[in-house]
Amino acid sequence: MRLVVTSLGEGPPVVLLHGLLGAGQNFGAVQKALAADGFRVLALDLRNHGASPHADGMAYADMAADVAETLQAEGAWPAIIIGHSMGGKVAMALALTRPEGVTRLLVADIAPVHYPAPLFNAYIAAMRGLDLRPGLARREADAALVPAVPAAPLRAFLLQNLDFAQAPPAWRIGLEEIAAGMPEIAGWPDLPGSYDGPVLVLAGERSDYIRPQHTALFRRLFPAARHASIPAGHWLHAENPPAFLAVVRDFLAGQAGAAP
């Protein structure tokens, strides 16, 4: 499917892929900064997220095919691909299945493995359980999520997906499709081959998503992979934007069209 894209700047294409229950807008500050550096930066809403179409199935091969179709239509193929969490898995699947479309790859705080997802399952259950009645106020929706989502910033992140302008409020995202696809989202497919281009695996130092035992798998699938970390948790681009941007800029250094 064709995905919704926000594009800024001119130059070599850089593609930003968000995580579960996020949207392309989550990379807003990063997108503006890289566009100012001399890149065309495309932030995509993955299927069932943001303003993109809804569809059954959240298989990574399918989501990678969505990205490939969209980038080809946008004239941004091949491209540098940056993906965080679920978006990082989509980015890895794209590099493995369509390597000709990926000039280099940055994977942010995720590994090509299966993860248990009890917290996200709880978040999704709480979102599905909201009483979306006419007149529902944001503060009421926020209060209803507190038992399952104690952290206020995370509740605000989740409620970005709820359109309060509708009567009654409605989820913009394909919440039912995402809920049904959680086994695929938490998992990782057995994809053949490897990607030999430049790869940076960037971890949050306070996150346990990337572990020492994942190194051998990264090496097998991405022989040129380098590893780095920054002081942050799992949402490293939101928790430490300056450090995240510095690492990204270093990884992109030397690309034609980039500012000196």
Image (tube, rainbow, N blue to C red):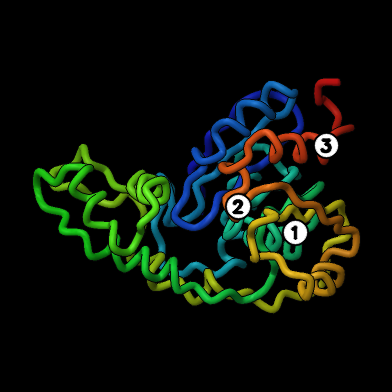
Q: What's the mark number on residue 251?
A: none
In the picture of the structure, the residue carrying the numbered disc 1 is 95
- Categorize mark 1 by other alpha carbons within 10 Å: few (<14), some (14-19), many (20+): many
Amino acid at pointer 1 = Ala
C-alpha separation, residue under disc 2 versus residue under disc 1: 11 Å
In the displayed structure, would residue 11 be above or below residue 77? above
For marks 2 and 1, the one nearer the N-term is 2
Looking at the rendered structure, which numbered label has been put on residue 67?
2
> Label 3 amino acid?
Asp
Circle 3: is it few (<14), some (14-19), or many (20+) Cα within 10 Å? few
Label 1: which secondary element: helix
Question: Closer to the N terminus: mark 1 or mark 3?
Answer: 1
Q: Is residue 33 visible?
A: yes
Local SS, label 2: helix
Residue at numbered disc 3: 250
Image side of residue 134 versus residue 92, left or right:
left
Q: Is residue 101 visible?
A: no
Badge 2: how crowded within 10 Å, few (<14), some, or many (20+)? many
At x 35%, y 65%, the residue is: 124
**Quadrant of res 175:** bottom left
Element at label 3? helix
